[in-house]
Amino acid sequence: MRLHWHRRDLRGADNRALRAAVDAGGGVVPVFVFDRDVLAHAGPPRVAFMLDALDSLREWYRERGSDLLVAEGDPRDVIPELAAQYDADGVTWAADYSGLARERDAAVRQALDDADVARESVHDAVFHEPGTIRTNDGDPYSVFTYFGRKWHDRPKPDPADPPTADELAAVTDDTPLPTLDGLGFDAPEADVPEASPDAARELLADFCASPIYEYGDRRDYPADGCTSRLSPHLKWGTIGIRTVHAATENAKADAPDEDAAESVEEFQDQLAWREFYTQVLFFNPEVVTANYKSYDNPVEWNDDPAALQAWKDGETGYPIVDAGMRQLRAEAYMHNRVRMIVASFLTKDLLVDWRHGYDWFREKLVDHDTANDNGGWQWAASTGTDAQPYFRVFNPMTQGERYDPDAEYITSYVPELRGVDPEVIHGWHECSPTQRDRTAPEYPAPIVDHGERREQAIAMFERARGDD
Ligand SMILES: Cc1cc2nc3c(=O)[nH]c(=O)nc-3n(C[C@H](O)[C@H](O)[C@H](O)COP(=O)(O)OP(=O)(O)OC[C@H]3O[C@@H](n4cnc5c(N)ncnc54)[C@H](O)[C@@H]3O)c2cc1C
């Protein structure tokens, strides 16, 4: 008998760790542990999504004559206790590469060794385990391009077979799943998407049916909605990466022309970015709170709580920034291009430390993933690996004009600007107070001057570099 400890692999299908538990023979007892230390780092949307996913997973096991056992406590106590209770001779789990998870897993490994129970951490969440794609000198990559090429060239395994009913232990657990409130979280202010593996597969099928062929051209246009929206599912493992990749390979084979096939590859590139940031975090766990890139002097960020609050509330007077920040609150999600714009705005226009933005995203995003979130923030703040150079500062007006020319995305989240001419929206910073008052009296004037702040941002980084 084996215990399979689910963590960020909340599915039965295409789960290599669960498959390894099954292949060990003797039946599998699935278990999930609510760990308050881990939950302390989560926000309501993410926990709501997780609870919904657990509900589906439990149902999935029950349909197969088994059950998902739920327990609460410190896994280093709970897992060995459950192993003893079910007379399990081994425990499997899917490897998690973040620093906190690795510390937890090391403690559980030690506790199982002490109890003389075998354990196996199985590589599942990404194709290529951190450390398996390296430079020719054997170092981990700090630049994406070559990592990405090697990632594409390596063979990709097929989805793992789900266990059959016979391969699962006939256990039952009447303990209800805890509620959000019971775990100490408020209800999320956002509408959280459905978390079941069926919902994930549906998103994938819809995406591969057609938007994937436009992805290369249209992925930067937030009003188009032509990205997959798979991020919370990849975060919580309600879909396996092999399933996603296999579907995209089928889409590539069916692509109507060369451009469409290249568009599929561009999507696959994003899956490679996910693995790139996973290995950056694996080799540099300190980046969760520290700059990846070291400057000679500290970066002198602004301590500006009022500006930070205006940014969080979507009240900066920069329409594309405000639309993004309001999308975050409404949907616990934000389009990738807009994430880049709002992150640049916080760090290079408001000159506020990226860590404040990262913390807000961690609390509000349903797809918050330490590696990707940190990678995205440090990229925008010019403190990361393969980051935006410090002197490149996004212009929020031209970004809005280029990627949301009709202000369709902006007006869907900023009702004060509905009915306003897109040209006026994109030129909001140039409008006179009277003109603003006449066109959209409820919408704020820009809280900073972009041109001035751009100069200040460059000067701030030059001081950090010791250039003056
Ligand atoms: C400041 C900032 C913060 C971010 N925080 C997160 C986060 O917490 N969690 C997260 O999953 N992504 C994060 N991203 C990356 C990206 O914005 C999201 O993955 C993407 O918007 C999710 O939407 P989608 O599933 O429709 O993406 P798609 O475009 O359909 O991409 C498919 C998948 O590829 C991965 N992916 C896409 N873009 C990136 C990227 N730039 N880096 C790493 N992986 C990527 C994701 O798993 C995504 O679901 C962040 C980006 C920035 C700039």
Image (tube, rainbow, N blue to C red):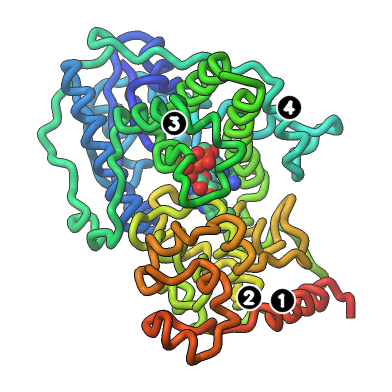
Task: Residue 250: give x, y in percent of width and height.
Answer: 51, 16
In the rendered view, tell whether residue 33 sits above or below residue 45.
above
* Mark 2 or 3, nearer chain start: 3
In terms of image quadrants, where is residue 393? bottom right
Locate residue 258, reporting x and y percent.
66, 22
Out of 34 and 311, give the one closest to the viewer.
311
- State if disc 4 and disc 2 touch (CB < 8 Å): no
Query: Is there CB contact under 8 Å for labels 2 and 3?
Result: no
Q: Residue at x 24, y 8 (%)?
A: 166
Quadrant (top left, top right, bottom left, bottom right) of the N terminus: top left
Name the residue rendered at 82%, 75% in the picture: 462
Disc 2 element: helix
Residue that carries the numbered disc 2 in the rendered image: 349
- Residue 230: image x %, image y %? 43, 38
Mark 3, other Cα within 10 Å: few <14 / some 14–19 / many ≥20:
many
Give the residue at mark 1.
454
Return the residue at label 4: 150
Q: Earlier in the sequence, mark 1 or mark 3?
A: 3
Point out the tag, 2 or 4, that comes first from the N-terminus.
4
Q: Amino acid at mark 2?
A: Asp
Which tag is nearer the camera, tag 3 or tag 4? Answer: 3
What distance separates the C-alpha of mark 2 from that of mark 3? 35 Å
What is the residue that sits farthest to the right in this orientation? 468
Are the two marked residues, 1 and 3, in contact with CB atoms closer than 8 angstroms? no
Give the class, few, some or many, for how many residues have Cα within 10 Å of label 4's Cα (few <14, many ≥20).
some
Q: Which amino acid does the dot numbered 3 rest on?
A: Phe
Q: Which mark is residue 207?
A: 3
How many neighbours does mark 1 have within 10 angstroms: few (below 14), some (14-19), or many (20 or more)?
many
